[in-house]
Image (cartoon, rainbow, N blue to C red):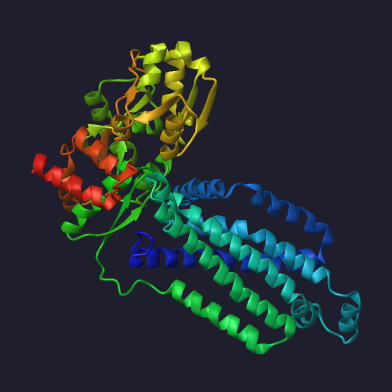
Amino acid sequence: MIWGVSIAELARLMQAHLLLSACAVLAACALGLPAAVWAAHHRRASAPLMGAISLAQTIPGLALLALFYPLLLLLARTTGWAIPALGFLPACLALTVYALLPIVRNGVAAIRGIDPALREAADGLGMTAAQRLRLVELPLGAPVILAGIRTATVWTVGTATLATTIGQPSLGDLIFSGLQTEDWQRVLAGCVAAAVLALVADALLALVESGLARRSRLRWGAGLALLVAAAALAFAGPGVSTGQRTIVVGAKNFSEQYILARLIEDRLHRAGYRTERRDNLGSAIAYRALAAGDIDVYVDYSGTLWANVLQRKDNPPAPAMLSVLRSELAKRDGVTLAGSLGFENAYAFAMKRSRAESLHINSLADLAAKAPQLKLASDLEFLSRPEWQAVDRAYGLRFADKRSYSPTFMYRALEDGSADVISAFSSDGRISAQDLVTLTDPRHALPSYDAVLLLAPKGDAKLAGALKPLLGGIGIDAMRQANWMVDRDKDKRTPAQAAKWLDGKLKYTAE
């Protein structure tokens, strides 16, 4: 174990991170170097090219990664091609775009910076344009070109941690899960490992660069050989495939989802399946990935599906909602709603008990009168979701300030006074542990949020059978306790340990 992370997990994620980064940098070089040569010799066309590449660079890395998923999904639906819209391909494409700027900019500067007298001498010797490029311009410009590739490589290795959000395993898995569960050892392990990869790659490219600058074959040869060895390690497969089907289990970006994903994995392992996980998916991406077959199973919540997927604004009773969801998801996307797990994780506005009592706030109607004096902290999605719009329409909440946080830091904001109200989750163990009170919803603006098991289209009966014991087997108290095991400050448990504990409670109640 290194900082609470197993050697096997760290090695697997480092290899996946290295593979993604290497492919993105190689693709950027394959596209960027010819573009740089062309732009260097066509000055009028270089300005729009550099402008377009610079514009792409201004898009935040996380947004660029997220945009490629719906684009690939749309392309797959339009053409009928089997395009993997989740995971490696969108991450690699986004990182390739992100790496282009330093490669193209340095390439143009390297070629344009060559002494014009040398070009004239090459022309005087009767060299063609291609010969002049190969024998004069590229050798002389190589150090500057490699400096751009070094910059692109360091950027790419760092940005690749964000690929976790679209289902591509990377060292970001450690960082994101560590942030959500306040496991700072995992965060540190992911950051240090990514930094080491970036520094090693930069050092090897620096060795090649200095070898070319000094015309030392030993230096650039050694650097190139080590880079090839690193690439071979990245591209090395996990071994001979047994032909056994691998089930991909999805999870969103909070503790409960990590626990349930591992609980599902444990059940599938007992049934003889191999599994992979795709953690930290956004709500929209998770469902689309399931409908497209990029993941096979995950847990979602009925209110989320009702408002976000079906775009429904009414609020029927929970049984009626589940019935409509089951039929509509199957008819529209072929998705199977296997059933409820037995508990609800609803959105609920929460306050410190002492603060709510001092302001005489018991309901959202009471909150509306006091909202102009209060600050709201929400999770990263809530303020852009239909649920918030429904609450805002029903109660007219006008807070003095609204800010979004990751779920962990949202609770911290309430604890340290940065916020007065949060958009909490009803199954969160921190509600009881921090003595919070949840406000009632007398106008029923918020729908029910039964935790439901979703299966991808064309799922097999054996898979559904292996997961059937989960249905109706998890009570709200057990789920809160499992969540609190992961979220508490002292004597923390990992999501895998919490899942094992929850599985024991499941056997007691359901089997």
Along the viewing direction, whichever of 485 and 507 lies nearer the viewer: 485
Q: Is residue 447 left or right of residue 342?
A: right
Query: Please, is residue 379 above or below residue 202 in the view?
Result: above
Query: Please, is residue 462 above or below residue 395 in the view?
Result: below
Position in image of residue 316 (x %, y %): 29, 20
Residue 413 in view here = yes
Position in image of residue 346 (x %, y %): 32, 29
Position in image of residue 95 (x %, y %): 56, 58
**Numbered marks: total:** 0
Query: Please, is residue 205 above or below residue 373 in the view?
Result: below
Residue 334 in view here = no
Along the viewing direction, whichever of 185 and 254 lies nearer the viewer: 185
Q: Is residue 70 left or right of residue 465?
A: right
Residue at (57, 60) in percent of width and height = 156
Q: Is residue 126 left or right of residue 315?
A: right
Along the viewing direction, whichever of 469 and 326 lies nearer the viewer: 469
Q: Quadrant of the N terminus?
A: bottom left
Image quadrant assignment for residue 128: bottom right
Position in image of residue 450 (x %, y %): 26, 31
Residue at (76, 75) in percent of width and height = 141
Residue at (38, 66) in percent of width and height = 12
Q: Quadrant of the C terminus?
A: top left
Query: Please, is residue 269 above or below residue 286 in the view?
Result: below
